[in-house]
Amino acid sequence: MSRTFDAGDLLSPETYARESKGLHAEVRAHRERRTVHIGPNAALMFEDASTVRYQLQETLRMESISEDSAVQAEMDAYAVLIPDGSNFKATFELGFADANERHARTAELIGVEAHVWMQVEGFARTFAIAGSSLERAAANRIPAVRYLRFELDNARVRELKKGGRLFVGIDHPAYRASLALAEDVRRLLLQDLR
């Protein structure tokens, strides 16, 4: 699996502007099928080439990026979010509708991303490797979005391909929840593996 984009993977700015409404609906439905809610306030949105390409196109459009070197820099930055055959990559979000609750929970949930895990049936948990959020943690804030990677060894991949169940959870002192992935989601995620 390729972890890179090239210019041929992207729509021209004109084509994207013309087709963006339809693409938005299509990618949103695709993304919802790949989203797992862990408890009432946390979600993992498992990324793939389609979801990442859409995010990249949106960034290029919104920031009016068109210079070749700048487009290439964005493509390189987004490519690392695509699973590369031995892992799952996900956007992790915490959401609290009530502003008072969000403020109250901020300090106690700093570092929660280090407690997010996946588990292939019959194996130990695999904890997420999180992208850096040190600046926000230092500012005593939790970032709204974090990018997580779950590395899987060959034995876990084989077990998943044989039909092994897949569990996700959070084991943080201030937030504990877990569940087994629905079979349709598990099958979708298998496409991300070699």
Image: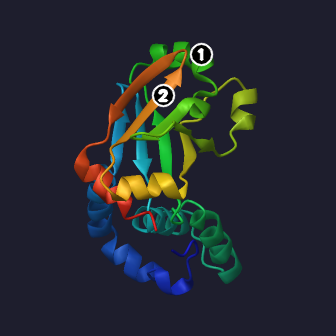
Q: Is residue 193 left or right of residue 181?
A: right
- In the drawing, what numbered circle is on residue 68? none
**Percent x, y for residue 138?**
76, 28
Residue bearing mark 2: 170
SS for tag 1?
A: helix
**Percent x, y for residue 162?**
32, 57
Foreground pick, 149 / 29 = 149
- Distance between mark 1 and mark 2 Cα atoms: 14 Å
* Amino acid type, residue under disc 1 in the picture: Glu
Foreground pick, 80 / 105 = 80
Residue in view at x 64 percent, y 70 percent: 76
Where residue 103 sits, quadrant-wise, is top right
Q: Residue furthest bottom?
A: 8
Residue in view at x 47 percent, y 13 percent: 100
Q: Is residue 45 left or right of residue 180?
A: right
SS for tag 2?
A: strand
Residue in view at x 66 percent, y 82 percent: 68
Foreground pick, 91 / 135 = 91
* Amino acid type, residue under disc 2 in the picture: Ile
> How dense is the environment of label 2, judged by Cα within 10 Å: few (below 14), some, or many (20 and up)?
many
Residue in view at x 38 percent, y 28 percent: 178
Residue bearing mark 1: 108
